[in-house]
Amino acid sequence: AQSVTQLGSHVSVSEGALVLLRCNYSSSVPPYLFWYVQYPNQGLQLLLKYTTGATLVKGINGFEAEFKKSETSFHLTKPSAHMSDAAEYFCVVRWRGSQGNLIFGKGTKLSVKP
Amino acid sequence: DTAVSQTPKYLVTQMGNDKSIKCEQNLGHDTMYWYKQDSKKFLKIMFSYNNKELIINETVPNRFSPKSPDKAHLNLHINSLELGDSAVYFCASGQRPYNEQFFGPGTRLTVL
């Protein structure tokens, strides 16, 4: 069955440290892939997306993600965490050929310690 | 200019009441969506409209009825509200083919 999995419901890093949020999907055909961020009591904002082409995609606020077909992964990274990065991060997929609805992972809450 | 707007932002009501949430987008997208976010932050699609036509209708109680008067608006009406309807409801809009979606600020519904 098709699914999207985020490893770790809560990740805590120190300010200035590397941020790595993991996402794997389960599907025979790679989906369209997105990362969204939700700041406390706010809506969702698109960080970055992979549809076709270059497998390393850069997004807003210094985030990037790499699509690895062999590993069915789309992990999100940022070299140096800022306090303002503290938020909930969602790995999201749209299965190719679907009607367009997004399927959300369960989310990873990122905490940044001073 | 707000791309996707929702009203109201907060809605507190009693069980059994009927309420509506409105959504408008000014991005010119052809598709709009309603999502529900539960208390554990899990987001799930409820409905999707493309050019005023319902194209996605997930397993949602028929107390929930979406209405799209035009492709820039998608409203959600809920009848006979229940405690379990308490959640944050997000409207979103998107454009084919990739359906990158833009989300509204959410409506926090609390049923007492």
Image (cartoon, coloured by chain):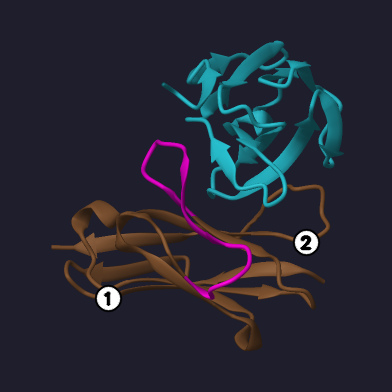
Chain colours: A brown, B cyan
In the image, residue A20 sits, relative to residue A111, either above or below, namely below
Q: In the rendered structure, which segment of residues is drawn in magenta?
A: A36-56
Toward which corner of the image does residue A105 lie, by quadrant?
bottom right
Q: Is residue A44 magenta?
A: yes
Provide residue B14's location: percent of width, then percent of height. Answer: 62, 14
User: For this rendering, which residue is in front, B63 or A87?
Assistant: A87
* Residue A94 as seen in the image, left or right of residue A57: right
Mark 2 and mark 1: span between their CA atoms?
32 Å
Q: Which residue corresponds to mark 1?
A: A18
Q: Which residue corresponds to mark 2?
A: A96
User: For this rendering, which residue is in front, A9 or A67?
Assistant: A67
Q: Is residue B44 magenta?
A: no
For disc 1, the chain is A
In the image, residue A50 sits, relative to residue B29, either above or below, namely below
* Residue B11 as seen in the image, left or right of residue B97: left
- Residue depicted at 37% across the width and 45% down the height: A39
For this orientation, the residue located farthest to the front is: A53
Kindly identify the amino acid type of the residue bearing the numbered disc 2: Arg
Kindly identify the amino acid type of the residue bearing the numbered disc 1: Leu
In terms of secondary structure, where does tag 2 sit? Answer: loop
For this orientation, the residue located farthest to the left is: A114
